[in-house]
Structures are given as C-alpha cells and as structure tokens.
Image (cartoon, rainbow, N blue to C red):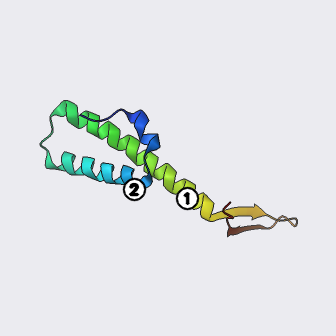
Amino acid sequence: MAKAPNDIAALSFEKALAELEEIVRKLEEGQVALEDSIALYERGAALKAHCEAKLKAAQEKIEKIVVDESGAVRAEPAKFE
C-alpha cells in the first residue's frame, strides 16, 4: 500500500506534509488492515523525519550563530547565495 521510503528524499516539504496528513487521516479512520496500518505508520514516521529535517535546514538558512574576533557570540541573518 505505501511507497518505498527511499522516494521520500525527493519530496518537497509541502508534498511530504500533505502525504503525512493523508496517512494520519487513514489511520484515524481505522478502516485499514493491520499490515497496511503498519506500513502506513512506518512511512508516516519517515515522512515526519523528512519534514523535520527540511524545517531544520530552512531554520539554519534564516540565521546563523557567529563568534566575532572578541569571542562574543551573536546571531546574524544568513546570506543566501
């Protein structure tokens, strides 16, 4: 029923989140066979991890922590190239 987890890396955040929401909906309905539920749960866990990684990467792009010459630590906006 669920796709192979190796295709998740190619998904955008939005597509992964939409698929995760669909999996949650199916599992909450309780109309899925046990084996399919297990496969959906495993895929959902992989999608969740993928979304979290995408969010973390986006956050790291927004600001970065720098240490200046005096040793002071500060956050500054990230520069996009």
Say which of 73 and 22 sits in front.
22
Q: Residue furthest left?
A: 31
* Mark number, residue 14: 2
Does residue 50 lie above or below 71 as drawn?
above
Left/right placement of residue 5 relative to residue 78 reads left
Left/right placement of residue 50 relative to residue 67 reads left
Residue plotted at (44% across, 51% down)? 12
Splitting the image into 4 quarters, where does residue 2 fall?
top left
Residue 37 in the image, given as x and y percentages of width and height? 22, 37
* Mark number, residue 58: 1
Residue plotted at (40% across, 41% down)? 46
Residue 1 in the image, given as x and y percentages of width and height? 23, 34
Q: Secondary structure at mark 1?
A: helix
Q: Amino acid at mark 1?
A: Ala
Q: Amino acid at mark 2?
A: Glu
- Mark 2, residues whose alpha carbon is within 10 Å: few (<14), some, or many (≥20)? few
